[in-house]
Image (spheres, helix red, strand yellow):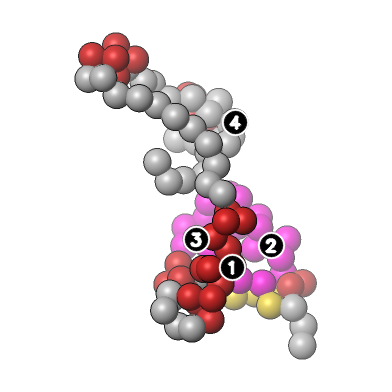
Amino acid sequence: MVGVYIPNDPGGPDSLAKKGEIVFDWGMLWFKGQRVATGQCNVKAYNRQLRELIHLGKAKPSWIVSHTLPLDNAPDGYQHFDKRDSGWTKVVLQPAA
């Protein structure tokens, strides 16, 4: 499953989410013969290749960017993103020229 998973989420929609927990039917998982595995993707294995695809215009991730802010506004941007304010998906920070 793609996503960002954290140990707890004080702003979660219910008491379980606030503690970083979900209801999960282990019996059905076993019955269907499914497996569960976790781990983080190996970002370092892909970042140069992805950067090159972006540079060549073959990949265009800009559709996910919701805000472009000067570097001085980083704390405000992180605050909105952390609170999951509506419309704050990805923020690009631009250092002063």
Closer to the camera: disc 1 or disc 2? Answer: 1
Q: Position of residue 62 (x, y in %)?
A: 47, 74
Label 4 and label 3: CA atoms lie apart by 20 Å
Q: CA distance from mark 4 to mark 1?
A: 29 Å
When the figure is inspected, residue 52 is found, relative to residue 86, above or below; the finding is below
Q: Nearer the viewer, mark 4 or mark 1?
A: 1
Q: Which is in the foreground here, disc 4 or disc 2?
A: 4
User: Closer to the N terminus: mark 2 or mark 3?
Assistant: 2
Instruction: State the SS at label 3.
Output: loop
Q: Name the disc covering residue 48, or none.
A: 1
**What residue did someone put label 3 on?**
89
Find disc 2 in the rendering and name its residue: 76
**Which residue in the structure is indicated by mark 4?**
7
Badge 1 or badge 2: first in the primary sequence: 1
- Looking at the picture, tell me which residue is in the foreground, 2 or 84: 2
Q: Quadrant of the N terminus?
A: top left
The type of residue carrying mark 2 is Asp
The Cα atoms of the two marked residues, 4 and 2, are separated by 23 Å
25 part of magenta stretch: no
Give amino acid for label 3: Thr
On screen, residue 6 versus residue 33, left or right, reads: right
Question: Quadrant of the rendered structure where residue 27 is?
Answer: top left
Viewer-side residue, 92 vs 27: 27
Q: Residues within 10 Å of mark 4 (few under 14, many from 20)?
A: few
Say which residue appears at 36% left-offset and 20% top-offset. Answer: 24
* Tag 1: amino acid: Arg
Is residue 74 visible in the rendered image? The answer is: yes
Write the residue at 58% across / 63% down. Answer: 47
The residue that appears at 54% across and 60% down in the rendered structure is 46
Q: Nearer the viewer, residue 97 or 43?
A: 43
The total number of labels drawn is: 4
Residue 59 image offset from top left, x and y in percent: 43, 74
